[in-house]
Image (tube, helix red, strand yellow):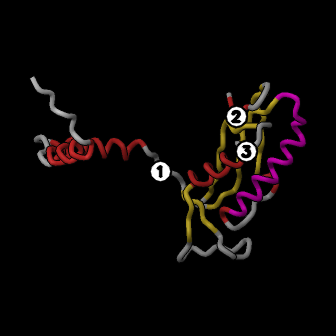
Amino acid sequence: MALEPPLDPLDRALRAARGAEQQPTGWIELSESIMSRVRGLVTPTDPILVFPGTEPGTRETEGSTFVSARIVIAALRRLLQGTPTHAPKVIDLDIDDALLTGVELKLVASYGIDLITLAARIREQVLAEVADLIGRGLAADAVTIEIVDVTEGDPNLN
């Protein structure tokens, strides 16, 4: 009994691709059903108006640019996870008629950190990040920070 040498990986892939041309019956309907369910998992988010070089207080809606709230939240999450002194637990945006009016943060802080100094530093960083993202800043009191937990070590690792 002679053993045949194993097939080359490229040859196996080519044979598998040729076999994929013969789709089972009902595959199209099944794939459409799966894709509609996947699309339903991603929830839409609110649009936020971007102000490229406009004066504060003015609002142009014709030809306006919007950014998804999901993008702003992701950018703030990356910013807040950058140091071992704190980690974001919840990031909520207050949006009124496509205008970002506030940011609410719930943070976990590392034990032994001066929380008042930490909150002031985070507020400045968040205000700068928001101004970079949407083209206009928020008032300092528009960013609310709540420390919901304190943990030993880096809260980003827990």
Dot label at residue 144? none
Question: Label 1 belongs to which residue?
Answer: 44
Nearer the observer, 129 or 12: 12
Cα–Cα gap, marks 2 and 3: 9 Å
- Per the rendered image, the range of residues in magenta is 111-132
Identify the residue shown where x is 65% and y is 49%. Answer: 93
Dot label at residue 156? 2
- Quadrant of the frame with the N terminus: top left
Residue at the front extreme?
2
Identify the residue shown where x is 79% and y is 58%. Answer: 139
- Residue 88 position within the rendered picture, expressed as x and y whole percent measured from the top left: 69, 39
- Callout 2: SS: helix
Identify the residue shown where x is 80% and y is 47%. Answer: 122
The type of residue carrying mark 2 is Asn
Residue at the top extreme?
1
- Residue 33 position within the rendered picture, expressed as x and y whole percent measured from the top left: 25, 42
Identify the residue shown where x is 72% and y is 37%. Answer: 87
Of the image marks 1 and 2, the number of the one nearer the N terminus: 1
Question: Label 3 belongs to which residue?
Answer: 82
- Callout 1: SS: loop
Q: Are marks 3 and 1 in contact (CB under 8 Å)?
A: no
Cα–Cα gap, marks 3 and 1: 27 Å
- Quadrant of the frame with the C terminus: top right
Q: Is residue 64 above or below residue 78?
A: below
Cα–Cα gap, marks 1 and 2: 27 Å
- Callout 3: SS: loop
